[in-house]
């Protein structure tokens, strides 16, 4: 189990000041973000992002919530809706936002972000940062058990046995993946203090749970049929299938034969903002069941090799597949051959670990 030292909000503010990560600090930063007028929350659509958004809505109950993907934010999809009244959570910093809360290694901010209040620190989850901050002003005691699992899932600290269990929070995380409408319903339930068991018992949510359990069989079959292991890297190609998988499922099936995995998903020719379709991409994960302390290779080196917008954590990150000739990004559309070229280049880098 990874051990994280939980800092108080005042310690987080100290980190911001000492490293000058937010340029000119707004008046009142020492008192936290409570004085800010947040009208909109742009947050990641996974469990961590949803829980973070629910925590912020305890303080700003009328704030609009928009779910997004790191690649969408970097591609400018949300440029027209992010302003000084916007909080961006569990996503890359946006220079126009009023508040940024994040913990991803590749999103560690530098100077030059104007007057945005940036709260970044090493943490197992963005939700944990939000909890540490806002629990000083609002009652968040009902989040405590949920946060333990958010931390485990987002930091790679979940055990093999825990992942294969029937824990309700695991199913909550899978339900959220069904789309922004379901994610919003879950966020509202959490904001209102509804326990996880009761959320899953909701008629609409329970139908999604049944669907997810049915889909699990198809996912297992797709991984089993599409996985190959090369130099202790498990490679699963799911592009064009409409199926996505996290690293936990792949490495749970690969077992001790792999140290990490890469999952190819998305659709050729798609762009961010194309509804349910998104660009063909790769996700990289350490086999955290085998390597409990972060893995043997910084996978962000792969995620950022061709895609300047790629990134995440050293043990969990991702990027778009880019058109390449040799080891150079080309100015053309991505082809199916480019997927194989990217994989080959990443395996070459991996072989030098």
Image: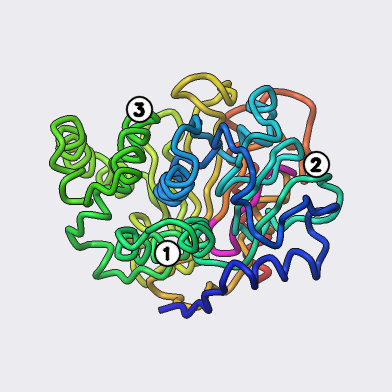
Q: Is residue 127 left or right of residue 117?
A: left
On screen, residue 107 versus residue 3, left or right, reads right
- Residue at the spot of label 3: 181
Q: Nearer the viewer, residue 90 or 340?
A: 90
Answer with mark 1 or mark 2, whichever residue precedes in sequence.
1
The C terminus sits in image quarter: bottom right
Q: Please name which of the two marks, 3 or 2, marks the residue nearer to the observer.
A: 3
x, y percent for residue 240? 44, 28
Dot 1, how many residues are within 10 Å of its Cα: few (below 14), some (14-19), or many (20+)? many
167 in relation to 274, above or below: below
**Marking on residue 328:** 2
Residue in the image at 26% along x and 55% along y: 169
Q: CA distance from mark 3 to mark 2?
A: 39 Å
Give the x, y percent position of residue 47: 39, 48
What residue is shown at x 55% (from left), y 67% (from top)?
123
- The answer to whether residue 348 is visible is no
Indicate whether 289 appears above or below 140: below
How many marks the image carries: the answer is 3
Residue 105 placement: quadrant: bottom right
Confirm or deny contact between disc 1 and disc 3 (CB under 8 A). Answer: no
The quadrant of the rendering that contains the N terminus is: bottom left
Q: Which residues are magenta?
A: 308-316
- Reading the chain from its start, which is encountered first: label 3 or label 2? 3
Relative side of 42 to 287, left or right: right
> SS at mark 2?
strand
């Amino acid at each position: 189990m990874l051990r994280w030292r939980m800092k108080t909000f005042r310690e987080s503010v100290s980190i911001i000041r000492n490293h000058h990560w937010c340029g000119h600090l707004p008046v009142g930063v020492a008192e936290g973000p409570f004085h800010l007028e947040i009208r909109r929350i742009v947050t990641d659509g996974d469990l961590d992002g949803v829980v973070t958004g629910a925590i912020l809505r305890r303080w700003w109950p009328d704030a609009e919530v928009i779910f997004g993907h790191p690649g969408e934010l970097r591609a400018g999809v949300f440029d027209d809706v992010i302003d000084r009244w916007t909080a961006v959570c569990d996503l890359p910093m946006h220079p126009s936002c009023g508040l940024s809360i994040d913990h991803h290694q590749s999103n560690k901010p530098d100077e030059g972000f104007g007057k945005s209040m940036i709260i970044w620190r090493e943490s197992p989850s963005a939700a944990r940062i939000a909890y540490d901050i806002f629990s000083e002003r609002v009652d968040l005691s009902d989040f405590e058990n949920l946060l333990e699992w958010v931390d485990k899932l987002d930091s790679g600290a979940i055990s093999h046995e825990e992942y294969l269990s029937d824990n309700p929070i695991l199913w909550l995380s899978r339900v959220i993946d069904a789309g922004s409408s379901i994610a919003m319903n879950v966020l509202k339930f959490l904001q209102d203090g509804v326990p996880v068991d009761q959320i899953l018992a909701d008629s609409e949510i329970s139908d999604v749970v049944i669907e997810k359990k049915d889909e699990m069989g198809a996912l297992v079959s797709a991984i089993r049929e599409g996985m190959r292991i090369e130099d202790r890297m498990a490679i699963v190609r799911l592009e064009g299938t409409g199926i996505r998988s996290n690293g936990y499922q792949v490495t749970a099936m690969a077992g001790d034969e792999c140290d990490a995995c890469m999952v190819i998903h998305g659709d050729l020719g798609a762009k961010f903002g194309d509804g349910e379709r998104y660009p063909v991409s790769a996700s990289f994960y350490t086999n955290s069941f085998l390597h409990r302390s972060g893995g043997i290779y910084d996978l962000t080196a792969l995620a950022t090799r061709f895609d300047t917008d790629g990134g995440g954590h050293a043990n969990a990150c991702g990027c778009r597949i880019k058109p390449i000739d040799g080891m150079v990004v080309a100015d053309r559309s991505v082809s199916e051959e480019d997927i194989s070229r990217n994989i080959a280049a990443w395996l070459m880098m991996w072989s030098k670990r």
